[in-house]
Amino acid sequence: MAAPESNVDDVVAVPLRHPWRWISGGIATALLLSFIWAVYSAESIQHEIVTKFLFDHRILEGMLVTLWVTVVCMTFGVILATILAIMKLSVNPLLRWLATGFIEFFRGTPLLLQIVFWGYLGIIFPEIFLGIPFTDIVFFRDQTSDVIPAIVAGIIALSLNEAAYSAEIVRAGILSVDSGQVEAAKSLGMSSGYTMRKIVLPQAMRVIIPPIGNEFIGMLKNTSLLQVIAVAELYTRASTISSANLAQIELLVVSGFWYLVMTTVLGFPQRALERRYGRGFAVVGGRAAPRAFKVGRR
Amino acid sequence: MAEVMVDARNVRKTYGSNEVLRGVSLTVERGEVLCIIGPSGSGKSTFLRCLNHLESINGGRIYVNGELMGYRQSGNVLHEMKPKDIARQRQAIGMVFQKFNLFPHMTALQNVIEAPIGVAGINSAEAKELGTKLLDQVGLGDKGDHYPSQLSGGQQQRVAIARALAMKPKLMLFDEPTSALDPELVGDVLDVMKGLAKAGMTMIVVTHEMGFAREVADKVVFIDKGQIVEMGTPKQVLDKPQEARTKAFLNKVL
């Protein structure tokens, strides 16, 4: 039966006006614009210096270092975090205790302190060697500063710190998977390692990825701390230039701009990963369609 | 004489001071269907989970297909089995759970063929053929590329049955397979199970579906407080129960 064209029951009401929404929004926008204008028109900021250094090859090289150090540290960090998370969930009390100790230690001390510590490793242990203790058998011996240059020290520091934080994220992800999944896997004759790789971790990923995305962005910015051990990343390059030309603010704007670009761009692969591991799950929040409307394969 | 598939002898299981199973003994022959009924908390699900060593037992012995489950006996000494060997034993025993426990990140077909490929080691073309055939058998041949979240409860449970069958088990365990389903979806699942029984599969079914037990079971066991109260044909146990506890239970559920 066709619906009648109009009906006295239809709700045709005059919408309620919301003047305060407009007024509050207007005030906030005005404040923002005036701040941007104040910064833009400040005489102490020379725009031509900003534009001149924005694409300076030293800045771009520094950015490259920032990017690859971030990716390397996150990779090591997350791999180590997964191992720590599994250790923490192990039935072996010694493994549990060691993982907990590691996490407590690296979460409980400032990152800056850890970076400086690894940077100074050459002073604490001038030589490192690989051999059998209490014997004369030495496979390898060298100056610490040769084996561990600043960039390696920085990567070690950031990776270990990241592992401590991400371990709890990975552990939470593993715990979020229903125990029935493990039982079903066992009943099919799957080993515990296979169950972890094929059944538990892929489901845990759904819970792990959003906070790890956060960690990624945090890591990208934390690489700037490597300035204290003179790793030539973006912030170090910018501050080296500004200490020569004294245009501190301008170079902060330059490096700030690029950090913002990089953190924004990193959001895209994160969303792709979330879709990848969200397959089969009805995600609330508009990305995957609610279950009732989902037809066929995504 | 018929071949014994399951031989449980005086099985005991405790959680702390709580005795869940207090000496359960029964045998199931090849091709037989055994239904286990009983009030909740009676230990019937625990007993089922002991059969494939999802739970370890504190006393007694369980033999499936002639093999002692979970342990190796040399003389009078029992040795715990390696996880690898327990996993191998479990491959011969399919299990279907009350809450389906399908892998939500895999399609129906992937759910069915994951273990044949990853555990049994058959190649993926062969596995897909097998998987499609099994999905057809449970009436879901056209749902292979659906994720569990896109299927109804009854369809999910039928995929779970196909998944268990994919490992070509000699014994199938069903743990209240229809308890989590809407009433109108129960029939489809029970039909699949009837088909399996008719095809000669050895089955142990924990269930509240008395109609199913009456129609399909060769033997019905009533368990209460961790012990077998009454055991016999469906007619004996369901229609002419001898024990007061059985009568009281049946009065409540029928």
Image (cartoon, rainbow, N blue to C red):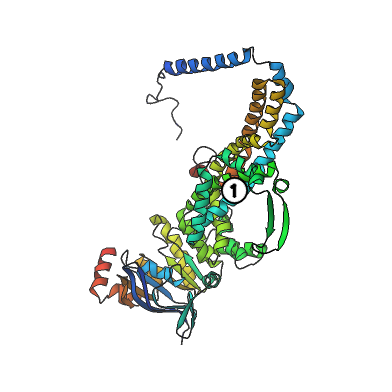
- Specify the quadrant of the image occupied by residue B222: bottom left
Give x and y (percent) for residue A226: 64, 37
Tell me the quarter of the image containing the N terminus of chain A: top left
**Secondary element at image label 1:** helix
Toward the viewer: A218 or A10?
A: A218
The residue carrying pointer 1 sits among few (fewer than 14), some (14 to 19) or many (20 or more) residues within 10 Å by Cα, namely: many
- Specify the quadrant of the image occupied by residue B133: bottom right
Give x and y (percent) for residue B99: 44, 58
Total marks in image: 1
Is any part of residue A296 visible from this angle? no
Locate residue B26 relative to residue A101 in the image: left or right. Answer: left
Residue shown at 32% from the left, 64% from the top? B41
Is any part of residue B207 visible from this angle? yes
User: Residue extending furthest right?
Assistant: A57
Toward the viewer: B85 or B110?
A: B85
Q: Numbered disc 1: what chain?
A: A
Eyeballing the image, is B204 above or below A87? Answer: below
Eyeballing the image, is B18 above or below B59? Answer: above
Give x and y (percent) for residue A45: 65, 16
Locate residue B17 relative to residue B51 in the image: left or right. Answer: left
* Residue identified by numbered label 1: A78
Give x and y (percent) for residue A290: 50, 42
Toward the viewer: B201 or A31?
A: A31
Locate residue A15 relative to residue A95 in the image: left or right. Answer: left
Locate residue A195 relative to residue B220 in the image: left or right. Answer: right
Toward the viewer: B210 or A213?
A: A213
Eyeballing the image, is B47 above or below A175? Answer: below
Amino acid residing under circle 1: Val
Tell me the quarter of the image containing the C terminus of chain A: top right
